[in-house]
Amino acid sequence: MIELSLRQRHYLERAVTYGLVIGMTALLMIPMIWGALSTVRPSKDLFTWPPKIIPSSVTLENYRLLLETTSFVQYFINSLTTAILAMIFTLAIAIPAAYAVTRYEFHGRKYVSNLSTIIYMFPLVLLGLPLFVIFSRLSLTNSRIGLALTHTAFALPFALMLLRVFFNDISPAIVESARLVGASRLTIIRKIILPLSLPGIVATIIFVMALSWKEYFFALLMMNDSGLYTLPIGIANLINIATTNWGLILSGVMIMSLPPMLLIFFLYDYLLEGFSVSSL
């Protein structure tokens, strides 16, 4: 048996750790890399066996067909509009609600967030039917605002819970000091609470926009007008009209994946801080 010094064992452990991490990452990335490269691969090469990671030639024909022969740009605009509206609605409700639950005493306060998270325990189908009936009565079906409100209803419990953690983390002494020098409640929220809770607010924005961006069930239920389809519904419909052109569909999925990835890439530090604090 080979005797290793403490230093050698340290290097061996690091080499094994890095090897496992790199190997697992490469294994998990293979389908994503294959899918991404398939968007620039000629259609005839998509189903070759054994599969080739590197395409034999590169073409942008799938992207050209996607943008010129389908309503993909309209689906993209619809998804972006809905996600931004859902984000605005969620923050507009969650910030004052989380602040009130955190700073004010009222009967049943500690149960508010706990009860609101129960919504995640229900199947979406169970929530979808009552929402569809209510929104039909209010003429909010086939409406980006209506769809954004359904996403808000689903995102709100988590946003409330996340923001409560950050608001709780702000020392009451800071708020009290501001109040003693004459700052109004609105000024305290705007100049103290919101800046100190910025990581939580950014994490909430990312969560809501990602949830709204990929949401399928409510969009399928609420939208009957093809001009208002969001990306998940629009891309799913491409399968029906182009069953053999998987390169075109993968190109749509690739473009759809870019905004969330860019959002997380540029705001990763805020997201990490937000979720690390929320797990305390």
Image (cartoon, rainbow, N blue to C red):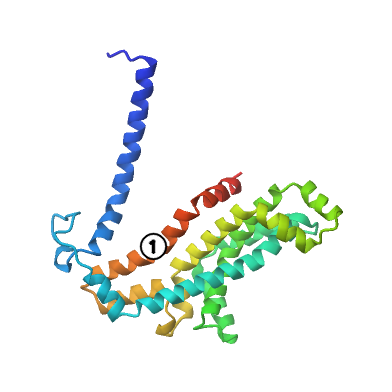
Q: Residue type at mark 1? A: Leu
User: Which residue is painted at 36% across and 14% down in the image?
Assistant: 5
Quadrant, the N terminus: top left
Query: Where does label 1 land, which residue?
Result: 258
Note whether 14 is above or below 73 in the view shown.
Answer: above
User: Which residue is painted at 35% across and 24% down in the image?
Assistant: 11
In the rendered view, does 63 fall on the left or right side of 105?
A: left
**Within 10 Å of the Cα at label 1, are there few (<14), some (14-19), or many (20+) other Cα atoms?**
few
Q: What element carries label 1?
A: helix
Q: Which of 157 and 118 is in front in this view?
A: 157
Q: In which quarter of the image is residue 88?
A: bottom right
Percent coordinates x, y for residue 192 in the rendering? 72, 55
Percent coordinates x, y for residue 145 in the rendering? 55, 78
Q: In which quarter of the image is residue 181?
A: bottom right
Note whether 84 is above or below 271 in the view shown.
Answer: below
Numbered marks: total: 1
User: Which residue is painted at 37% across and 77% down in the image?
Assistant: 73
Note whether 70 is above or below 126 in the view shown.
Answer: below
Quadrant, the C terminus: top right
Percent coordinates x, y for residue 108 in the rendering? 76, 58
Q: Is residue 127 visible?
A: no
Percent coordinates x, y for residue 214 in the rendering? 44, 66
Q: Can residue 138 be seen in this view?
A: yes
